[in-house]
Image (spheres, coloured by chain):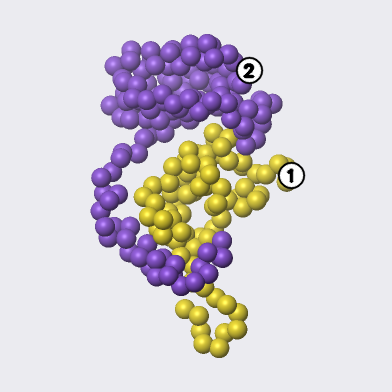
Chain colours: A purple, B yellow
């Protein structure tokens, strides 16, 4: 079982209830495949960087889930067939690594940067 | 790195992400990513931004993903 992040952009014209319905359907398919929904984020209506199917906005739903890899292809196909889904993307979730706090790993170049920051008007260079 | 007698002010580039101690760049973080694309929507090359190899490849991947999700443009409106 792998952890995935799936982001779905729904048609902005869709009502709240319809979207909940769609999300439920996705969650169901995950649990049916003995997966697990970790988290559902609702980003709400957002402006798209470019028009998709003549829509300027989209309702974003972000689902983090543990699923068997076989499910992903199936999920992808269903999103494609679903008219109310403008766009979708599933990627492997990055593991929260404990080494973030570990000094010296990212530290070396950062320390070099710090030396420069110590000198004045470093901020000017964008 | 600036040679002596050089009139033009020259500052050594450094990786801003290393400076901020960013461990991983997220494709969902479109606000941070906009700093690494040009006004045309292109990914800023390392030689311009000074980003280190590790972070640059992370940026590249993140920008490409963000483009799919229409968080970032493939190209800007006026050049289309």
Residue at left offset 32%, top offset 60%: A107
Q: Quadrant of residue B70?
A: top right
**Which is more toward the observer, A77 or A107?**
A107
**Which is more toward the observer, B73 or A102?**
A102
Residue at left offset 36%, top offset 17%: A30
Q: Quadrant of residue A16?
A: top right
Circle 2 marks a residue in which chain? A
Percent x, y for residue B8?
60, 79
Q: Is residue B70 above or below residue A73?
A: below
**Which is more toward the observer, B4 or B56?**
B4
CA gap between label 2 and label 1 equals 27 Å
Which quarter of the image is occupied by the C terminus of chain B? top right
Percent x, y for residue B9?
57, 77
Q: Is residue B47 visible?
A: no
The reply, left or right, for residue B42 in relation to residue B24 is right
Checking the image for residue B78, the label placed there is 1
Checking the image for residue B40, the label placed there is none
Percent x, y for residue B26?
44, 42
How crowded pointer 2 is (Cα within 10 Å; few <14, some 14-19, many 20+) is rated as: few
Circle 1 marks a residue in which chain? B
Residue at left offset 66%, top offset 26%: A55
Callout 2: SS: loop
Q: Which residue is mark 2?
A: A13
Residue at left offset 44%, top offset 12%: A25
How crowded pointer 1 is (Cα within 10 Å; few <14, some 14-19, many 20+) is rated as: few
Q: Are marks 2 and 1 on the same chain?
A: no
Callout 1: SS: helix
Q: Is residue B5 visible?
A: yes
Q: Is residue A92 above or below residue B35?
A: above
Q: Are marks 2 and 1 in contact (CB under 8 Å)?
A: no
Which is closer to the viewer, label 2 or label 1? 2
Percent x, y for residue A100?
30, 49
């Amino acid at each position: 079982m792998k952890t995935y992040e799936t982001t779905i952009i729904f048609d902005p014209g869709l009502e709240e209830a319809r979207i909940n319905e769609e999300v439920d359907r996705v969650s169901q398919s995950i649990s049916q495949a003995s997966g697990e929904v970790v988290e559902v984020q609702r980003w709400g209506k957002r402006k798209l960087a470019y028009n998709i199917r003549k829509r300027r906005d989209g309702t974003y739903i972000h689902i983090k889930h543990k699923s068997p890899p076989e499910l992903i292809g199936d999920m992808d196909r269903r999103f494609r067939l679903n008219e109310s889904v403008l766009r979708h993307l599933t990627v492997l979730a990055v593991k929260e690594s404990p080494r973030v706090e570990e000094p010296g790993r990212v530290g070396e170049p950062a320390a070099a940067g710090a030396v420069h920051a110590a000198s004045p008007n470093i901020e000017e260079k964008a | 790195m600036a040679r002596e007698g050089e009139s033009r002010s020259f500052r050594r580039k450094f990786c801003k992400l290393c400076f901020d101690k960013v461990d991983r760049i997220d494709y969902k973080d479109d606000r941070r990513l906009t700093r690494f694309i040009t006004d045309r929507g292109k990914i800023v090359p390392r030689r311009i931004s000074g980003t280190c190899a590790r972070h640059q490849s992370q940026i590249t991947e993140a920008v490409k993903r963000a483009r799919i999700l229409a968080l970032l443009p493939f190209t800007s409106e006026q050049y289309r």
